[in-house]
Amino acid sequence: MSEPTKAAAPAGRAATKKELPEHFKGYKHVWVFIEQERGQVHPVSWELMGAGRQLADKLKVELAAVVIGPEGEATRQAAAEAFCYGADLTYVVADNLLADYRNESYTKALTDVVNTYKPEILLLGATTLGRDLAGSVATTLLTGLTADCTALDVDADGSLAATRPTFGGSLMCTIYTLNYRPQMATVRPRVMQMPERVEREPGRIISHPLGLVEADIVTKVLSFLPDRESTNSNLAYADVVVAGGLGLGSPENFQLVRQLAFVLGAEYGCSRPLVQKGWVTSDRQIGQTGKTIRPKLYIAAGISGAIQHRVGVEGADLIVAVNTDKNAPIFDFAHVGIITDAIRLLPALTEAFRARLSPHSRDRIAS
Ligand SMILES: Cc1cc2nc3c(=O)[nH]c(=O)nc-3n(C[C@H](O)[C@H](O)[C@H](O)COP(=O)(O)OP(=O)(O)OC[C@H]3O[C@@H](n4cnc5c(N)ncnc54)[C@H](O)[C@@H]3O)c2cc1C
């Protein structure tokens, strides 16, 4: 779901809202945790600034970014950049003990800032880091957290309506944290639209101390080894994705997907059964329990289009489905449907694109 305001269902809310306890009444404003690791801000943080802006505007409150990291240029830059994505102010906890992500130190930093400045809504990316941090911050603050949301909205009385798939993706449910604050939610990368970046001078920056020494932190980081596999796959942010499903019939035929992706300069992905069969690694899985993608072009070959797959791809600008079954569910949401055998079509497409995209193709066409 692409629109942050799309799936909330305030009218159907059944829960009873008690009077918010007195000590929560001062909680105000929308916050987004800006995730940075080794000097790189994760793009999901900017996507959440877009969603946060819409919530803040509806509530008529401010949108704040929270940047946690080591002292120095990278943290300063992340704080400044937050203004270009719509922040009204930024909270910064900068301390060299925060150079590497550690649950204890980051939980302390974020819960301290929350307890001091009291936001009503706190959003984090559902990345590995964000999931780890959100869970421990929510349990430390004794508040509710809705994970992996696909839409966020504010209902008539100003509560956060956090919508996510449930029952294996066959139903969407909207979850409220009515009597506790802040209302927390995580959202996976690429679920929300990236807002436009607008060059702006940094505004209000509020620094907050960490208040920890190294001896207080049980976890020690001895060295950092990047995961070479995961950096190979840039599925979530790829402009073109080619994916295959069980209809391809064998791991050998899956090579046809990889070949087409290679010629197009695209990323390749797959449906979940291919991961379960061990044909493809799990970082390539697309869908509810895999990656959400938002490419300009998505080519799905031999994929039926089950709801759990659909929720991960429907943000694509153009979906081209290749399937032998004209009644396959994927044709309900594909923009272009090709009813044919993918095992025959994929090599033909690869050859056609190879000829078209080769640097010498113009000479060949001309001759
Ligand atoms: C909790 C839960 C989470 C899940 N998460 C995910 C997820 O993240 N991602 C995901 O993908 N699935 C997920 N699933 C699984 C999902 O429900 C489907 O089972 C799965 O997506 C089906 O994969 P498929 O389309 O490859 O296979 P199938 O459903 O078996 O479809 C194969 C398709 O290929 C077509 N076909 C056959 N031969 C050819 C050919 N030669 N050429 C072209 N087409 C052909 C068939 O007509 C059929 O439509 C999840 C399920 C559950 C319960």
Image (cartoon, grey):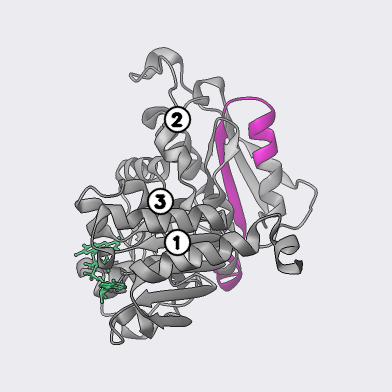
State the quadrant of the N terminus: bottom left
Image location of residue 51, percent across then percent down: 54, 64
Tell me if I can see residue 52 in this picture.
yes
Determine which quarter of the picture holds residue 238: bottom right
Q: Where 153 falls versus 200 (above or below)?
A: below
Number of numbered discs on residues: 3
Residue designated by label 3? 126
Q: Residue at x 57, y 67 (%)?
A: 296
- The image quadrant in which ligand 1 is located: bottom left
- Of 186 and 91, nearer the camera is 186
Residue ID for mark 1: 242
Residue 175: tell me if it is visible: no
Q: Where does the image place residue 162, in percent across and percent down from the top left?
A: 38, 67
Between 347 and 188, the one lying in front of the other is: 347
Amino acid carrying mark 2 in the image = Tyr
Question: Disc 1 on helix, strand or loop?
Answer: strand
* CA distance separating discs 1 and 3: 24 Å
Q: Which of the 4 image quarters holds residue 197? A: bottom right
Q: Quadrant of residue 329?
A: bottom left
| Residue where numbered disc 2 is placed | 101
Residue drawn at the location 76% of the way across and 46% of the way down? 202
Q: Which element is circle 3 on?
A: loop
- The answer to whether 76 appears left or right of 248 in the picture is right
Quadrant placement of the C terminus:
bottom right
Check disc 2: other Cα within 10 Å, few if <14, some if 14-19, many if 20+. some
Respond yes or no on whether mark 2 lies under 8 Å from ligand 1.
no
Q: Nearer the viewer, residue 300 or 230?
A: 300
For the point 53% across and 74% down, the residue is 318
Categorize mark 3 by other alpha carbons within 10 Å: few (<14), some (14-19), many (20+): many
Q: Earlier in the sequence, mark 2 or mark 3?
A: 2
